Amino acid sequence: MYKVVQDYVPKSVVTNKNKNKSWEYGYNKKYDFVCISRSGELGDIINIQGLIIGLPKQPKNIHSRSKKKSEQYWERIDIPKPLSKIQSIFQWNEMPSEFKNNWVDYIENEFDNRELGYWFMNNGVPTYISGAHYMYLQWTSIDVGYPDYREANRIFYLFWEACKADNRSFGMTYLKIRRSGFSYMGSSESVNTGTLAKDARVGILSKTGADAKKMFTDKVVPIANRLPFFFKPIQDGMDKPKTELAFRIPASKITKKNMYDADKEELLGLDTTIDWKNTDDNSYDGEKLLLLVHDESGKWIKPNNILNNWRVTKTCLRLGSKIIGKCMMGSTSNALAKGGDNFKKLYEDSSLSKRNSNGQTKSGLYNLFIPMEWNMEGFIDRYGLPVFRKPTEKTIGVDGEVIENGAIDYWEAEVESLKNDPDALNEFYRQFPRTESHAFRDESKQSLFNLTKIYQQIDYNDSVIKEHHLTRGSFSWKDGIKDSKVIWTPNNRGRFLVSWTPNKNLQNRVINRNGKKMPGNEHLGAFGCDSYDISGTVGGRGSNGALHGLTKFNMDEAPSNEFFLEYVARPQTAEIFFEEVLMACVFYGMPILVENNKPRLLYHFKNRGYRAFSMNRPDKVFNKLSRTEKELGGIPNSSEDIKQAHAAAIESYIEKHIGLDMEGTFRDSDLMGSMPFTRTLEDWAKFDISNRTRFDASISSGLAIMACQKHLYTPEKKSSKISINFARYTNKGLISDLIR
């Protein structure tokens, strides 16, 4: 789940700054990592899903419950009995000085653990947990008592601490498994933040207002009430409030006796509140929040929209360009049509690999996914570590029970038992995902295509290292001279994803014949394109342009029947898109089939002399084409016959080339298909033939398949129904006889 990054910062720099205790908490721009050490000393630097985090330096003295390695693990330490009887700061103030002196070190140490974090020995390994994690384990009372230590939660809290420390981050969005403890962790953090800050507000949202209220009343309020007295501020109102938990001095009548003590009393109140709101796009609009806990954000059902809500609540966490609050968001995902799609978009917009010039992700959040095998109930040993496979020796779980199976073994058995029930299987994947793709599985009931095969391919893609199979980049004209040679350049910010580029002898094969530029590699494959004509749209909500390249069966130096290029983007102007499509066609020397209801791309090809690259619709002979179709090429998207043929082309390709061919009809049954572009696979899974405009990748990929199989759509020559019989005669003798 994470790895230590060796020598990320030069050792000499670490040594010198540790000596001076000069490492600052927060984002270190010079070395591009987030330091979560508050002691000024830096220890290991780790990488959690792309976020580089600097941990505190390991101290000399580390708590250990035993000298024996096997007996070293997390163990909560009860509050000393003399202190357990004290319920408020006022009772503490009334205690004798001798009593206070005996316990003040213990209390100060607890405050240090809360602020700096905590070290303990775990099976012989010095282990650091953040202050928030310590508060969760040590002082957060949940439904079963107190939480168990889990390595998965340690990773979560280290990531969260880095999000809090990073001044570029609005917080985190956590893609989780069912019953991972997020609601309690979010409630704990609400109380932890609310009982530390002055003049602040903590907000809670969930999939419904009732769920948010339940989280507040059943989790937040009890956690706050059960804190030890030294962490519990003065509270206004009832012990069990229903809407707001207020840490402030209750209003009281001013008398001659207390009027001079008002300032002294005021210092004891934080004037901080924790509350919840009903689920709505405008929840907390106009408010200023220090912390927003977003529970079940992947389950917002229409008309509520988590994307719209986040656009509003994000402003509650900022003042101008300064981020003043953080969001802790976490959820499993509903089916895409039931809120999961919006959460998926938000999660993808939170990818750490895609930052803008301000160093922020598109959403402002950082995404985190922890696979199910790391956090599955019943498969966590007493050291908090996951048991992946069936143990070969006796293994005691965190609950004291013997663990006899592995989390992955259990998961695989469940998957095997559900393989004949796609909807039940997809629901299981969403609840207990091992990959991000599992978490966003959709219902199969409405799918036009074979979801089983599509998801088999997606799972396979998730299991391989994508960087070894796909390259992102861009095309350009050599030396900037148009219509010369096209150059391919790998570029992390490019809009093209490719899995194959032709050898140099096959690149830029453009044949000039009678003044016409013709594709020289038409025998290798073709492109399909879903274009657009208008550069700008109201609100920037126009659909993307899409381009896909597919090879045919061939005996040349190229793969057969494989997609090799994916482009799904909307550049600033339509002209940029047209030119990028043209360069791809020239570089690969392949023709293109384009929908002709948006003709500007076709005119771009024609005006530049590449009309021969634009394929004619394959379902009509040339003489039957309209005048415009003869001029530009392309294929209409309005015909019902074309729509059906397009969908059938994708369906046929999926059956033959995607996932496993269990019957062994088209290839060996254990041979996985080849389709490295997961975005297109996911688009196929959601494709709706009655609303095709939303599925740019499906449109262009289907056209590429039709272009490579144009012979299937060639109209048959019809034989004439008129029979003309000519009389025939024999020419023997003097008189010809009629042959009957």
Image (cartoon, rainbow, N blue to C red):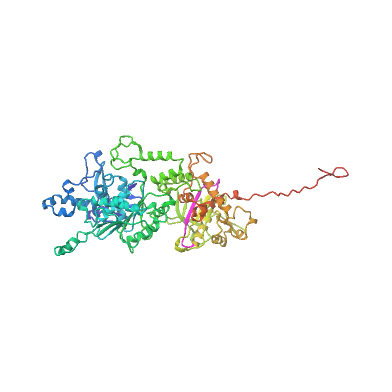
Is residue 53 visible to us here? no
Q: Is residue 397 toward the left or the right of residue 724 in the image? A: left
Between residue 102 and residue 509, name the one nearer to us.
102
Quarter holding residue 282: bottom left
Between residue 578 and residue 662, name the one nearer to us.
662
Quarter holding residue 170: bottom left
Q: Residue at x 21, y 40 (%)?
A: 67
Is residue 87 visible to us here? yes
Q: Is residue 474 toward the left or the right of residue 610 in the image? A: left
Residue 322 lies within the magenta run = no
Residue 568 lies within the magenta run = yes
Between residue 515 and residue 139, name the one nearer to us.
139
| Principal secondary structure, stretch drawn in magenta | loop
Between residue 23 and residue 403, name the one nearer to us.
403
Furthest residue in direction right, as rendered: 734
Q: Is residue 96 toward the left or the right of residue 242 in the image? A: left
Furthest residue in direction top, as rendered: 393
- The x, y position of residue 327, in whole percent, is 33, 56
The quadrant of the picture occupied by the C terminus is top right
| Magenta part of the chain | 551-573
- The x, y position of residue 303, in whole percent, is 42, 56
Q: Is residue 397 toward the left or the right of residue 338 in the image? A: left
How many numbered discs, if any? Answer: 0
- The x, y position of residue 135, in whole percent, is 25, 50
- The x, y position of residue 707, in whole percent, is 56, 51
